[in-house]
Image: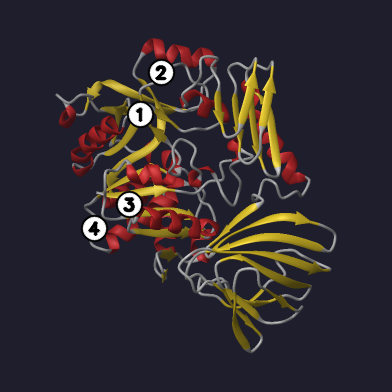
Amino acid sequence: MIPVIMAGGSGTRLWPLSRTQYPKQFLALNSDLSMLQETVRRLGGVSQVSLICNEEHRFLAAEQMRVLNQSCSIFLEPVGRNTAPAIALAAIDAVNKGLGGECLLVLAADHVIEDEHAFQQVIAQAEPLAKEGMLVTFGIVPQHPETGYGYIKADVSSPASEAKGEEHTAYSVSAFVEKPDLATAESYLTEGGYYWNSGMFMFRADRFLEELGKFRPDILEACQKAMVNTAADMDFVRVDAEAFSACPDESVDYAVMEKTDRAVVLPLDAGWSDVGSWAALWEIKDKDSSGNVFDGDVIAHGTTESFVMSSNRLVTTLGVDNLIIVDTPDALLVADKSKIQDVKKIVAEIKDAGRNETFQHREVYRPWGKYDSIDLGERYQVKRITVKPGARLSVQKHHHRAEHWIVVSGTAMVTRGKETFLVTENQSTYIPLGEIHCLENPGKVELELIEIQSGSYLGEDDIVRLEDQYGRA
């Protein structure tokens, strides 16, 4: 079995914590591990996984897999083209490696599943069905009439014979149903045989491509072309950008699952949530006696049924009810919990204003470490930079700014022009405007330094990379 984890997406409904450059699948929302790491861990130990992610998230994904010591192949999408093309890339790769008969277990990277044993049992039950050539989808046993999910209608008169006698019976799929209104969702629960569409699947790689070629040969052809000239780059698999960009944008539901006569739904009752909003996260968290969830430095009085998160400072509440409060270093969200789905309107307005708060956090992660923009003025910027042991920034220069580096802890190896030298704690150095330079951590502990930039323009695009070990030059 080959796990294929879909790690794309921007997670805007969890703004301001989730942002374009650091979306929810890479955040630790339900434990000390990120949602992506939780997804891998609940598989119970697998030798290899395939990740599908955006080009801009490649180093985040690789670092989180390194922390888990998980071997993986990371397919980089040059542009987002939805789930059908993404799954096709992994399936074509499996076929090219002679593994077409292996089952692909397609999972989202940003789901919570509380009962991992039940999840693993259902996965084991699905594998023989998939081996027989069926396309299995996992339907979540509904706990309430939900209007935020699509539904799968099972043909209860047509059980899959291979699943008889198991804890759950797999049924032929009668229909995929769009998100309903409340009255319709209530009728689904009353009638029975309806399941929430989880977006998780299992099928043989060759069978999926066969069905995709039958119903959407244009998608299959574009993905096959994209996989002809792949380039290996560390753990990354880069597909042909031009060919993949020409691929139609289509979900696997529309492209294959709604059309094939071999789709079966296997019920899954394992405490599942797609954590699609702050209200959904509040639902799955342990609450105090007043129905509150507090995360971080929070003091509350007379507060009920609320979710309060503080990332770096004290947040206090007094006499409030049913609120979502999320405080980050550069943005604060205060919302009525019943209106939280409309956070996308706030995100859209911030984007339209040309602001940066939906794109990245004040603290920005790079393959070599991270930096935090502490202060920003008209002609200066102050950053706290952390460089991982053995890591090295690109050889670069700037046209519009000079930099002053002050080492706080660790040791820096600095290249400035033709000279290379060490800078240790409480020492500093100066990089003139236009000077070719490089920063490296030769030590065994993290290097922390303060960078003071000064100049007429301080944007990140004023970096001319001349050499880079991470392929960004």
**Alpha carbon separation for disc pair 4 and 1:** 27 Å
Q: Using the image as rendered, state which of residue 104 and residue 114 is in the foreground.
A: 114
Circle 4 SS class:
loop
Q: Using the image as rendered, state which of residue 266 and residue 210 is in the foreground.
A: 266
Percent from the top left, x then y, of residue 361? 64, 49
Amino acid beneath label 4: Leu
Quadrant (top left, top right, bottom left, bottom right) of the C terminus: bottom right
**Alpha carbon separation for disc pair 2 and 4:** 38 Å
Which of the two discs, 1 and 3, sits closer to the camera?
A: 1
Query: Image height check: is 403 above or below 199?
Result: below
- Label 2 with label 4: CB-CB less than 8 Å: no
**Alpha carbon separation for disc pair 1 and 3:** 22 Å
**Alpha carbon separation for disc pair 3 and 4:** 13 Å
Q: Earlier in the sequence, mark 2 or mark 4?
A: 4
**Alpha carbon separation for disc pair 2 and 1:** 12 Å
Percent from the top left, x then y, of residue 422? 58, 79
Amino acid beneath label 1: Gly
To which residue does mark 1 refer? 139
Q: Earlier in the sequence, mark 3 or mark 2?
A: 2
Q: Earlier in the sequence, mark 1 or mark 3?
A: 1
Which of the two discs, 2 and 1, sits closer to the camera?
A: 2
To which residue does mark 2 refer? 143
Query: Image height check: is 312 above or below 458?
Result: above
Circle 3 SS class:
helix
Q: Could you tell me which residue is drawn at 70 percent across and 41 percent down?
A: 331
Most distant residue in the bottom direction: 418
Q: How crowded is the residue under tag 3: few (<14 C-alpha within 10 Å), some, or many (20+)?
A: many
Q: Earlier in the sequence, mark 3 or mark 4?
A: 4
To which residue does mark 4 refer? 99
- Label 1 with label 3: CB-CB less than 8 Å: no
Amino acid beneath label 2: Gln
